Image: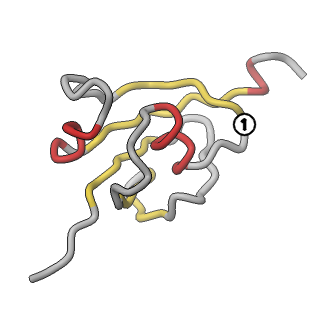
Amino acid sequence: MTAEADTISVSVQFHPLLRAYLPRPDDKGPRTVSAPVNTTIGEIVRLFWGLPSDIQVFAVVNGRSRTLSTVLNDGDTVSVFLAVAGG
């Protein structure tokens, strides 16, 4: 297996309300990142960007709502939003 076959490339963008929680709030994205095969949305959000675990988020992958445990595929586009409640 080649090194390329061991990784995927995904595009990730954080909603503006989440940027204040990121290590680099000025990082407006979207950013394309390489990750190991079988990486989940949660791993991208928490490990690659360091978003604190107490911040509740939801994600959309390729236009469809997904859980943070969803395994990403090469070429996926991920949008991460702050989960809000109320009405």
Rendered image quadrant of residue 13: top left
Query: Residue 65 occupies which quadrant of the picture?
Result: bottom left
Q: How many numbered marks, from 0 up?
A: 1
Q: Residue at x 51, y 58 (%)?
A: 68
- Is 51 placed above or below 61 here? above
Name the quadrant of the N terminus: top right
Q: Is residue 13 left or right of residue 70?
A: left
User: In what quadrant of the picture does the C terminus appear?
Assistant: bottom left
In the rendered view, would you say 53 is above or below 33?
A: below
Give 23 or 62, whichever is nearer the viewer: 23
For image coordinates 57% across by 28% down, the residue present is: 9
Q: Residues within 10 Å of mark 1 (few under 14, many from 20)?
A: some
Q: Is residue 70 above or below residue 24?
A: below
Identify the image's colour scheme: rainbow, by chain, secondary structure or one colour.
secondary structure
User: Is 77 left or right of 3, judged from the image as shown?
Assistant: left
**Residue, x 79% and y 16% (percent of image)?**
3
- Seen as rendered, the residue at the extreme top is 3
| Depth check, front residue: 62 or 6 | 6
Q: Nearer the viewer, residue 47 or 69?
A: 47
Dot 1 amino acid type: Val
- Judge whether 48 appears above or below 16 on screen: above
Rendered location of residue 54, percent (x, y): 38, 57
Q: Which residue is mark 1?
A: 37
Foreground of the two, 1 or 51: 51
- Residue at 39% x, 46% y: name it: 52
In the displayed structure, does residue 11 sit left or right of residue 69? Answer: left
Residue 62 at x, y percent in the picture = 43, 51
Task: Determine the residue located farthest toward the right in the rendered image.
Answer: 1
- In the orientation shown, which residue stands out farthest toward the left? 87
- Mark 1 residue element: loop
- Where residue 5 appears, as percent x and y from the top left, is 78, 25
